[in-house]
Image (tube, rainbow, N blue to C red):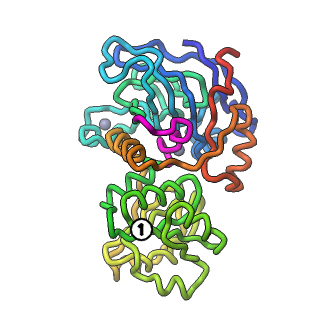
Amino acid sequence: MKTLGYAAFDTTSPLAPYAFERRELRGNDVAMEILYCGVCHSDLHTARNDWGWSYYPIVPGHEIVGRVIEVGPDVTRYRLGDHVAVGCMVDSCMECDQCHKGEEQLCREGNTGTYAGADRITGEHTHGGYSKHLVVREEFCLRMPEGLDLARAAPLLCAGITTWSPLRTWNVGPGSRVGVIGLGGLGHMAVKLAVGLGAEVTVLSRSPDKQADALALGADRLLVSSDEAAMKQARSAFDLIIDTVPVKHALGPYLPLLDVDGTLVIVGQVGPMDEINSVPLLLGRRRVAGSPIGGIRETQEMLDFCAEKNILPDCEMIRMEEINHAYERMEKSDVRYRFVIDMASLPAQP
Ligand SMILES: [Zn+2]
Ligand SMILES: [Zn+2]
């Protein structure tokens, strides 16, 4: 299947149009026309090969919402016209203990990335959602629930599930005290989802000017991390802190904020951390953890929860050709809170 996308061709050039082929449908494949694709920081890191696993050309995008246009003969769950979604992975071994538990993101053999991955059968490079079409095996296809705004839902597929999974892993519910560090694409979803689960939610920020934003998203309060007195008063005040900061930063100031057995979970930064002092960890039996996306079942649960509670990311819609400008703005955190590409802006033919 011929399709058109936007690809990075090397580490520095702007993304540009790229005509390529999607695979012929296998028995259990679903082909979709992509309607919307969110813009994630990982897309930019991959375009620039910041993590060392890129190839070129590469089509980024792993927050994908589309409509089914063709199904293989063995597909049972989806039919033509269904609204569907794809997140950060398109395959896994399906046989290991993690896959059997529905935690395909933790597959012992490694999951297959929607981009920057290799097809498990042919070894071909995978390409993501900055394109008109996608072919994916049905087990990695999500169903868009009725009533969820398709244009705004795309960021749920990465930013949404990345923050939902730790909320579920650490059993957040009514009465849980949740802190969220950072108020970008991930952070704003963490706030909305934790509020939706009934938690008491505090946004932690270095500057007091995030107060209005935090409250508008549904948080109960802002804790200014540069305010020493306020930080002292907030000691042992959290069960879970979700740390969405995407760059290297100090964890030291946040650890005393955790209650006994509390956890600070890193979901943003990928790479070496600043040194930490183990004293608050030992004395309070506190934990520092990390969490990637979530499994397919958990992702579907999150989509259904968002439809039920009418939780949607705050998005700014862009046209495909505006992607390079959007990357510049994303780097400056100049977006509230996620760019979404309207794929109708990309012609079907080059
Ligand atoms: Zn992402
Ligand atoms: Zn597996």
**Residue annotated with mark 1:** 178
Q: Where 24 falls versus 32 (above or below)?
A: above
Q: Where 58 falls versus 327 (above or below)?
A: above
Q: Is residue 137 visible?
A: yes
Q: Is residue 228 left or right of residue 141?
A: right
Residue 187, percent from left and from top: 53, 58
Tell me if residue 88 is in the magenta stretch. no
Predominant SS along the magenta part? helix
Quarter of the figure with residue 169: bottom left
Give the position of the N terminus as an image quadrant: top right
Q: Residue at x 50, y 66 (%)?
A: 219
Which range of residues does the magenta coloring cover?
A: 146-159
> Tag 1, which secondary structure?
strand
Tell me the kind of residue under disc 1: Val
Residue 161, percent from left and from top: 43, 47
Residue 46, percent from left and from top: 60, 40
Q: Is residue 231 left or right of residue 289?
A: right
Q: Residue at x 73, y 47 (%)?
A: 328
Tell me if residue 153 is in the magenta stretch. yes
